[in-house]
Image (cartoon, helix red, strand yellow):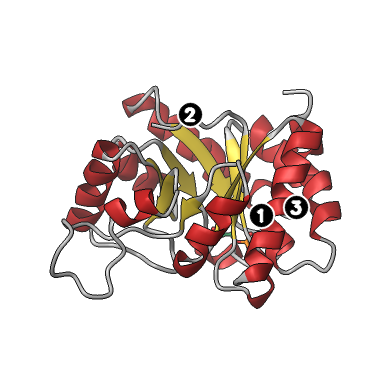
């Protein structure tokens, strides 16, 4: 299993046109150069068709945005763990609010990823669901209130109790799983607030993937991580 250094900033490219195809490669290279310059941990999650080209172009960890359960064979259109490994992935997001999974499939995907040494970040929408996700023993849980996603209103500023509640509830059942948070994270202050509330990193998308000046935004985001 790849070791992800904490605190981490994970950038989900979603399906933003500015982070698609060759632009995904360029954005991942920007993430890599900022990670190296600032000595911080950045993970990128491009779309499935871009995983191979991005993983060939950068040394920072490349994650898929989703993985289906199931063994290689008769699964037309599915994204399997074995294929992600072949594509150069180090891990995958699972159960993102824009691509929810049923519990049985989520559990199977976590176990398959574990067998394949893929790092798993299971996304959740609130503290209670975060605890349920933590009992599956993924590598990380990322709590993201869906109503703040893509708004630029940061969970760490607008709904700090989602983060503190998640940390408190998860730690009661699982001392080891990494806890991330996301939704609306746009600035270094948002990242700092998330860490102060007990998160070990952030998951974000639009602030970087939609920006005309992604390098500037990335630098501002990781500034608080320099002294961690
Ligand atoms: O996966 C990250 C995401 O859902 C948060 O999106 O655009 O609010 O940073 P955004």
* Distance CA(mark 1)–CA(mark 3): 5 Å
Quadrant of the rendered image containing residue 79: bottom left
199 or 93, which lies in front? 93
Identify residue for label 3: 30
Residue 173, compared with residue 25, is above or below; it is above
Identify residue for label 1: 28
Residue shown at 18% from the left, 70% from the top? 75
Question: Given contact means CB atoms under 8 Å apart, are the residues at marks 1 and 2 in contact?
Answer: no
- Position of 135 with respect to 39 (left or right) is left
Dot label at residue 3: 2
> Counting residues from the N terminus, which is met first, the one under dot 1 or under dot 2?
2
22 or 61, which lies in front? 22
Question: Is there any visible trace of residue 122 in the rendered image?
Answer: no
Question: Is there any visible trace of residue 78 in the rendered image?
Answer: yes
Residue 113: x %, y % from top left = 29, 44
> Counting residues from the N terminus, which is met first, the one under dot 3 or under dot 2?
2
Residue shown at 81% from the left, 37% from the top? 223
């Amino acid at each position: 299993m790849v070791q992800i250094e904490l605190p981490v900033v994970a950038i989900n490219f979603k399906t933003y046109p500015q982070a698609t195809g060759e632009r995904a490669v360029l954005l991942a290279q920007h993430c890599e150069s900022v990670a190296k310059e600032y000595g911080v941990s950045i993970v990128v999650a491009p779309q499935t068709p871009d995983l191979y080209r991005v993983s060939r172009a950068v040394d920072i960890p490349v994650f898929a945005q989703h993985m289906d359960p199931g063994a290689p064979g008769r699964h037309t259109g599915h994204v399997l763990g074995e294929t992600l490994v072949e594509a150069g992935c180090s891990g995958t997001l699972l159960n993102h609010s824009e691509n929810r999974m049923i519990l049985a499939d989520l559990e199977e995907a976590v176990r398959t990823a574990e067998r394949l040494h893929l790092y798993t970040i299971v996304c959740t929408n609130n503290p209670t669901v975060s605890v349920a996700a933590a009992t599956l023993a993924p590598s990380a849980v990322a709590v993201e209130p869906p109503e703040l996603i893509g708004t630029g209103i940061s969970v760490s500023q607008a709904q700090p109790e989602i983060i503190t509640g998640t940390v408190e509830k998860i730690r009661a059942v699982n001392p080891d799983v990494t806890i991330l948070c996301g939704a609306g994270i746009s600035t270094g202050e948002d990242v700092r607030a998330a860490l102060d509330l007990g998160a070990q990193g952030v998951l974000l998308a639009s602030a970087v993937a939609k920006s005309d000046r992604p390098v500037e935004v990335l630098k501002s985001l990781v500034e608080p991580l320099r002294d961690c």
